Image: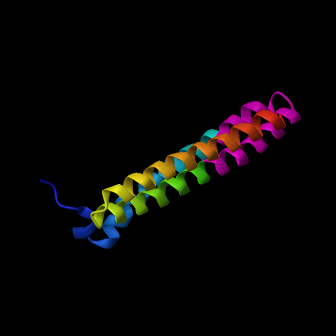
Amino acid sequence: MEQNKMATMPMKKLLLEMSVPLMMSLLIQSLYNIVDGIFVARLSENALTATSLVYAVQFLMVAASVGTSVGLNALLSQKLGKGKPEEACRAATTGMILMLATASVFYGGGRFLL
C-alpha cells in the first residue's frame, strides 16, 4: 500500500509536484483564449468584445466552482478524519445543493441577460 505523500514527501518537491499541473492547466486555458481571440478578431470588433466579456464570466464560473469544491473537500476530510460520516454526508449534500444553486445563478444570468 502506498504511503501518504502529503505527510512524507519533502515540502519543496511536494509543492512542485502539486502546483505544476495546475499552472500548466491555467497556461493552456489562457493560450486557448488568446488564440481564440486572434481568430475572432478577424470577424469583427463586436465579436472580439463579446469573447473578451465571456472570458471574464468563464473565469468567474471556474473560480466559484473550484473554490466551493476545495472548501467542501477540506470540510469532508475533517469530518471523515474525526469519524463523523453522518456529518460528512450532510456536508456533501449541502455542497451539492450549493453547486447546483451556483450553476443555476450563472445559467439564469446568462439566459436572461442575453
Image quarter in which the C terminus is found: top right
Report the number of discs.
Answer: 0
Residue 102 shown left or right of residue 56 in the figure: left
> Residue 37 lies in magenta, yes or no?
yes
The foreground one among 53 and 39 is 53
Quick one: which residue is furthest to the left in this view? 1
Quick one: which residue is furthest to the top in this view? 43
The foreground one among 47 and 8 is 8
The foreground one among 22 and 88 is 88
> What is the magenta segment's predominant secondary structure?
helix
In the rendering, at what x and y percent does residue 39 appear? 73, 31
In the rendering, at what x and y percent does residue 30 appear? 61, 46
In the rendering, at what x and y percent does residue 52 appear? 77, 43
Residue 9 shown left or right of residue 88 in the figure: left
Quick one: which residue is furthest to the front in this view? 86
Residue found 66% across the figure and 40% down from its top: 104
**Quick check: 29 above or below 2?**
above
**Quick check: 69 above or below 16?**
above
> Which residues lie in the magenta part?
33-61
Residue 85 shown left or right of residue 33 in the figure: left
Residue found 27% across the figure and 71% down from its top: 10
Residue found 58% across the figure and 42% down from its top: 100
> Residue 70 lies in magenta, yes or no?
no
The foreground one among 101 and 90 is 90
**Quick check: 78 above or below 99?**
below
